[in-house]
């Protein structure tokens, strides 16, 4: 090998090394998005109402969060990590809203049953003056 | 000397061949990204499911979903399947979230009204018990 060739090889190796080093140190990470998603998921998962009334929705959120974390660990593109983090956070929010809605549905059903019993009670007291109920308002 | 020149020439063409192959593989990887048809269909379905339900609560979230769906459709048309897929997937969860907000608000109102009518009846029963 000529001296020129050796010098070229050394230069090339140096170039590759600096590129690699730059690539390693300057890899931007979607840490903020992932942290935000973790926080939203954590608060949903810590809510007993969500665990009881929207377990399937919570599971979907957990799956997206796991995908985001695996991508982060595998040094995937930050945009990809941020995307899956966003999906995880939205799914956790959906789980929370769904659980709130199901709790309200249960409260609505109970109140309706109670109202029917009371109306019956009022009727059985032999009085026709049952107050006008507001009717079934839930569509 | 001509022999050495020729040898250098073939070596160069080997390098060129490798470069061309790498480039072709790279381009192949880009163009073989699948069209996110399923994701765009899913986003469209979620948005049209949310639209009749969302009136006030969840309106801002629905607008975000509609914007992202439009972006996904534009990107897909331009052949930018990677971004189209991201926008479509986000549009779908945004629309689902908008619908969850709207439905929750509706049921909360209904439950509050039912509760109020129970209280009215209880007052009436108490009044008659006197």
Image (cartoon, coloured by chain):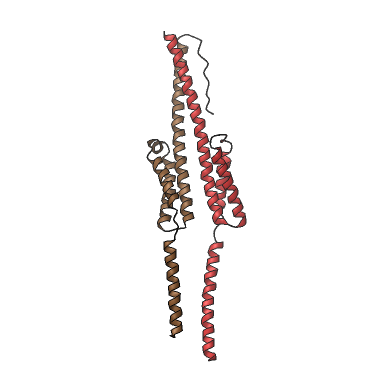
Chain colours: A brown, B red
Which quadrant, please, contains the N terminus of chain A?
Answer: bottom left
Q: In this view, does B116 lie to the left or right of B50?
A: left
Classify the position of the C terminus of chain A by image quarter. top right
Q: Which residue is drawn at 58% across and 46% down?
A: B67
Q: In this orientation, which residue lies closer to the viewer: A86 or A21?
A: A21
Q: Residue at x 53, y 45 (%)?
A: B92
Q: Position of residue B27 (x, y in %)?
A: 55, 66
Q: Which residue is drawn at 56% across and 38% down?
A: B59
Compared to residue B35, the image places residue B61 above or below, namely above
> Along the line of sight, which residue is nearer the eye, B101 or A25?
A25
**In the displayed structure, would residue A67 be above or below residue A21?**
above
Q: Number of labelled discs?
A: 0
Q: Is residue B39 left or right of residue A48?
A: right
* Residue A69 visible in the snapshot: yes
Q: Which residue lies furthest to the bottom in this view?
A: B1
| Observer-nearest of B22 and A136 | B22
Residue B4, position as x, y percentages in the image:
51, 89
Vertical order, B3 against A51 (above or below)? below
Q: Is residue A67 visible?
A: no
Residue B93: x, y in percent? 51, 44
Q: Write down the quadrant of residue A29 in the picture.
A: bottom left
**Residue A124 position in % (x across, y down):** 45, 11
Relative vertical location of residue A69 with respect to residue B9 in this rendering, above or below: above
């Amino acid at each position: 090998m000529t001296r020129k060739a050796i010098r070229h090889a050394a230069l090339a190796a140096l170039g590759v090394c600096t590129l690699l080093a730059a690539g390693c140190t300057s890899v931007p990470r979607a840490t903020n998005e992932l942290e935000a998603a973790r926080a939203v998921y954590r608060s949903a998962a810590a809510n007993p109402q969500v665990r009881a009334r929207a377990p399937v929705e919570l599971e979907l959120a957990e799956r997206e969060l796991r995908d985001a974390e695996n991508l982060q660990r595998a040094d995937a593109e930050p945009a990809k990590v941020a995307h899956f983090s966003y999906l995880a956070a939205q799914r956790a929010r959906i789980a929370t809203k769904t659980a709130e809605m199901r709790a309200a549905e249960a409260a609505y059903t109970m109140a309706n049953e109670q109202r029917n019993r009371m109306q019956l009670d009022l009727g059985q007291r032999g009085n026709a003056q049952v107050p006008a109920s507001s009717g079934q308002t839930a569509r | 000397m001509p022999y050495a020149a020729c040898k250098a020439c073939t070596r160069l063409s080997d390098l060129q061949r490798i470069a061309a192959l790498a480039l072709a593989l790279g381009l192949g990887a880009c163009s073989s990204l699948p069209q996110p048809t399923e994701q765009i269909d899913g986003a469209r379905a979620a948005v049209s499911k949310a639209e009749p339900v969302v009136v006030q609560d969840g309106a801002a979230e629905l607008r975000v979903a509609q914007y992202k769906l439009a972006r996904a459709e534009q990107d897909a048309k331009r052949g930018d399947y990677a971004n189209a897929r991201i926008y479509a997937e986000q549009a779908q969860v945004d629309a689902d979230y908008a619908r969850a907000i709207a439905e929750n608000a509706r049921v909360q109102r209904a439950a509050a009204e039912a509760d109020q009518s129970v209280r009215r009846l209880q007052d009436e029963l108490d009044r008659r018990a006197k």
